[in-house]
Amino acid sequence: MGERKGVNKYYPPDFDPAKHGSLNRYHHSHPLRERARKLSQGILVIRFEMPYNIWCDGCKNHIGMGVRYNAEKKKVGNYYTTPIYRFRMKCHLCVNYIEMQTDPANCDYVIVSGAQRKEERWDMADNEQILTTEQEKKQKLETDAMFRLEHGTTDQSKLQKAIPTLSNIQEAQSAWKDDFALNSMLRRKFREKKKAIKEEEEKTLALQTKANLSIPLVPETEEDRKLAALLKYHSLDSYEDKQKLKRTEIFGRSWFPSTPVPGASNSKVNSVLKKLAISRKPMPSGSSITSSDLGIVRRKSRDDLESPPESGEAPEPSGMKEEKENPPEGSSSDRDCPPDVEIQGGPTSTSVLNSSLVADYSDSESD
């Protein structure tokens, strides 16, 4: 950068090094250009950085530490041989001007006008920090022997009071002196803690898998253990015993209700089924099933009544005819068939099956 600037400098034809000395004197300008426009008044414009947090008196806004301004720097006095400078800058939020100056005695900055400091300081004496010796006290120590002796005695008494605290601090520092041992101890504790955390995660994962849970589980506490000990969930019978008992109840249950429900829609159907079940009689073994056994009777049509019996048919025996006319009491034909139905049997059973069959449901109470 320096070579580029040196090469690119333009020297006009009337430039005389013996007369002008430099280009700045030739152009009658300062090397700092606009920053030195008030140099005749002893003011130089510099970049100033706010040393601490303040409140602007004009707009009442907070200005944080480290905010930079173009400030006018001016010397206003000396602290012994140290100059005191004052800085004047304009607030970037309003038209108010803030003035600050250095304080070499306290190594600090003091607000002159235009702002108020945000108090974040502490007293060095209250914090038991080392205080800087004032100039007057320093001169008195150099010139007054008695004052120097008293000051030394006071310092000795302070030292005696601070010896126990200093010894404790030294012991604490000696415990941390071996860096390798401390590092090994910390790494060992870290490994143990990591192992415990891993075991807890495995235990939690196994419990979630067993219970088929997808929610996170919180750590177990002593209250949870006490509450779980008071609760016991157990069954008197096993699952197999319950299934066997249920099957037994199903097998022993009746298909039909024992007593019909009054007012139900199927009351008539239940009564018909009950009558059929009572009037049914078991068939004797070896007997052939006839149409009367099936509940089917034959009604004589008008043609059968008018036509005489065929010559090929055998006459009905008298005994059987009498039995039909006077059936015995309690017989099945008297119970099963109504009195106006004629039952055909014997040798004419084939003709009965060949003729038209009509079912009689007059006895049933169905609609």
Image (cartoon, rainbow, N blue to C red):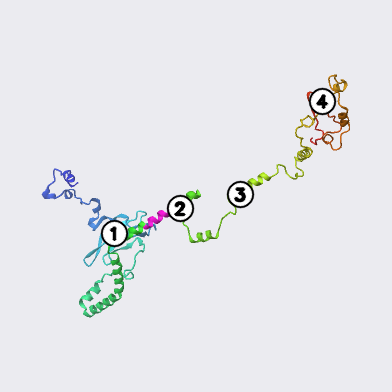
Q: Look at discs 2 and 1 and give the one toward the viewer.
A: 2
Going by the numbered disc 4, the residue's amino acid type is Pro
User: Residue, x 22% and y 56% (percent of image)?
Assistant: 40
Determine the CA span between mark 4 and mark 2.
91 Å
Q: Where is 270 relative to 302, above or below?
A: below
Q: Which residue is mark 1?
A: 87
Q: Look at discs 4 and 2 and give the one toward the viewer.
A: 4
The disc, 3 or 2, on the residue closer to the chain's N-terminal end is 2
Q: Secondary structure beneath disc 4?
A: helix
Residue 207 image offset from top left, x and y in percent: 48, 52
Determine the CA span between mark 3 and mark 2.
33 Å
Determine the CA span between mark 3 and mark 1.
97 Å
Going by the numbered disc 1, the residue's amino acid type is Phe
Going by the numbered disc 3, the residue's amino acid type is Lys
Labels 3 and 2 touching (C-beta < 8 A): no
Residue 36 image offset from top left, x and y in percent: 23, 53
Q: Which residue is mark 4?
A: 347
| 67 is within the stretch colored magenta | no
On residue 177, the disc is none
Q: Which residue is mark 2?
A: 204
**Which contiguous range is marked in magenta?**
192-204
Image quadrant in which you'd find residue 54: bottom left
Going by the numbered disc 2, the residue's amino acid type is Thr
Q: Secondary structure beneath disc 1?
A: strand
The disc, 2 or 1, on the residue closer to the chain's N-terminal end is 1
Q: Which residue is mark 3?
A: 242
Image quadrant in which you'd find residue 253: top right
